[in-house]
Image (cartoon, grey):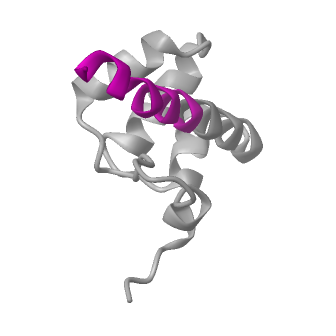
Amino acid sequence: MRSFNKDEYLFREKLGYLVKGMVKARCFQLLVELSSIRSSRGIYALEDYFVKGRDLKEVCNEHDITPSYVTSLLRKLQEVNHKVIDILPYYRN
């Protein structure tokens, strides 16, 4: 059985969850465009986390934002990703 690190464990509940360092840059850009996230600090922090695979603490320090704020943004982006996955079957048929 695969063990999850702390970051992955938070977002493993649904099929298709975003994983730190595993999101393609273009996919990330599209998800941000679909989301309500507009803070440039927040967007750069999320990009460092999801695309570049940097640790949450490191990202918070570099972008001068709190871990709780980044976590709320992570959840928002995860929700957008899940909505995209949920709607995909309607476009495939």
Query: Hey, which quadrant is residue 7 in on the image?
Result: bottom right
Residue occupying the far front of the picture: 93
State left or right for residue 68 relative to residue 22. Answer: right
Residue 30 painted magenta: no
**Quadrant of the snapshot with the N terminus:** bottom left
Residue 58 vs residue 42, the one in the foreground: 42
Compared to 41, does 63 lie above or below? below
In-front residue for pair 80/49 = 80
Q: Residue at x 25, y 20 (%)?
A: 93
x and y, in percent, of residue 24 in the image: 23, 35
For residue 48, side relative to residue 26 (left or right):
right
Residue 45 in percent (x, y) is at: 50, 33
Residue 77: x and y in percent read: 54, 31
- Name the dominant secondary structure of the magenta segment: helix
Seen in the picture, residue 50 relative to 39 is either above or below; the reply is below
- In the displayed orientation, state which residue is furthest to the bottom: 1
Foreground of the two, 57 or 37: 37
The residue sitting at 44% across, 83% down in the picture is: 3
- Write down the region rendered in magenta: 78-93
Number of disc labels: 0
Please tell me which residue is depicted at 67% across the width and 44% down the height of the picture: 71
Residue 69 placement (x, y as % from top left): 73, 36
**Residue appearing at x 60%, y 16% in the figure:** 37
Q: Quadrant of residue 26?
A: top left
- 79 in the magenta segment: yes
Q: Is residue 76 above or below residue 59?
A: above
